Amino acid sequence: MSTKTFRVKATALMLVGAGCASVFEMGGGEVASAATTINPSPTPFPGPFTSKIEGFSAYDGQTKCIRKAKPGVVAFEKFVLRKLKKASFGIARSCSGSSVSEHKEGRAIDWHMNAYNWRDRQQVKKLFRYLFKTDWWGNPYARARRLGIMYIIWNKKMWRAYRPFDGWQKYEGSSPHTDHVHISFARAGANGVTSFWTGEVAKLPEAWIPGWPPEPTPTPPNQGKTTGRFAGEDT
Ligand SMILES: [Zn+2]
């Protein structure tokens, strides 16, 4: 599909919203139910979204062996990645070996792109712009949050939802990820129950982000008033 089509649909999905109040809501039981509910065939929510949005996913690494692609990741491949350059993808993986990998739970995807190829790099940039764009309501990283993305690795760098404002940090794992983009999803995102798909905000295990949401700027006393006591008055 053409990039033009991608842009048009992306614009339709830009009507996403967020309220900072939801960022730190973490009911324990609700987290469990969001993580265990599965939407078998997610399709993108057509919008418009309300102002509510998921917070930033905490790190919640692989603990089980499932080896079956989760529906939210399959839908992400189908809807988002296929609008960019078609490349081979991989989601589920054998559980052999001791390394922790969300591929073993079917909640990570590899998009095979070449970091040494200019055209591939532009495609990857387009995806990251789409995921990280601040939405109409002023919420940063809006689609990454609505999709329940936990972290991304590409070209020796890593972006973590649980350290979003650190930006891209150096990645020193054994694979430099110069031949693919890796994206891991929180359980609710992988299950296709986050707001990107449902329009309803899922209760992710959310990271505590120092200084986020920002404190509202205090309003100076009596600002804008034309009557009453003013600073400096000694009455
Ligand atoms: Zn991977």
Image (cartoon, grey):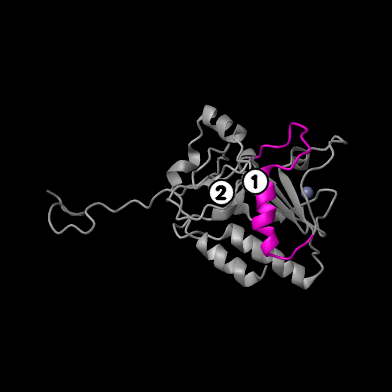
Indicate which disc residue 42 carries: none
Q: Is residue 24 left or right of residue 89?
A: left
| Separation of marks 1 and 2 at Cα, in angstroms | 8 Å
Q: Is residue 94 left or right of residue 149?
A: right
Query: The residue tagged with tag 1: helix, strand or loop?
Result: helix
Q: Quadrant of residue 115?
A: bottom right
Q: Which residue is mark 1?
A: 72
As drawn, the residue found furthest toward the right would be 97
**Vertical placement of residue 153 versus 83, above or below:** above
Label 2 is placed on what type of residue?
A: Trp
Position of 43 relative to 127 (above/below): above
x and y, in percent, of residue 192 in the image? 61, 44
Query: Residue 163: x and y, percent?
Result: 62, 47
**Does any portion of residue 59 appear in the rendered image?**
yes
Mark 1 or mark 2: whose residue is earlier in sequence: 1
Q: Nearer the viewer, residue 64 or 176?
A: 64
Q: Are marks 1 and 2 in contact (CB under 8 Å)?
A: yes
Task: Identify the residue shown where x is 57% and y is 42%.
Answer: 193
Secondary structure of the residue carrying tag 2 is: helix
Queried whether the magenta region covers residue 77, the answer comes back as yes
**What residue is shown with label 2?**
197
- Position of the N terminus, as image quadrant, is bottom right
Within 10 Å of disc 2 (Cα), the crowding (few <14, some 14-19, many 20+) is: many
Residue range highlighted in magenta: 59-87
In the rendered image, residue 94, in percent from the top left (x then y), is placed at 85, 39
Callout 1 environment at 10 Å: few (<14), some (14 to 19), or many (20+)? many
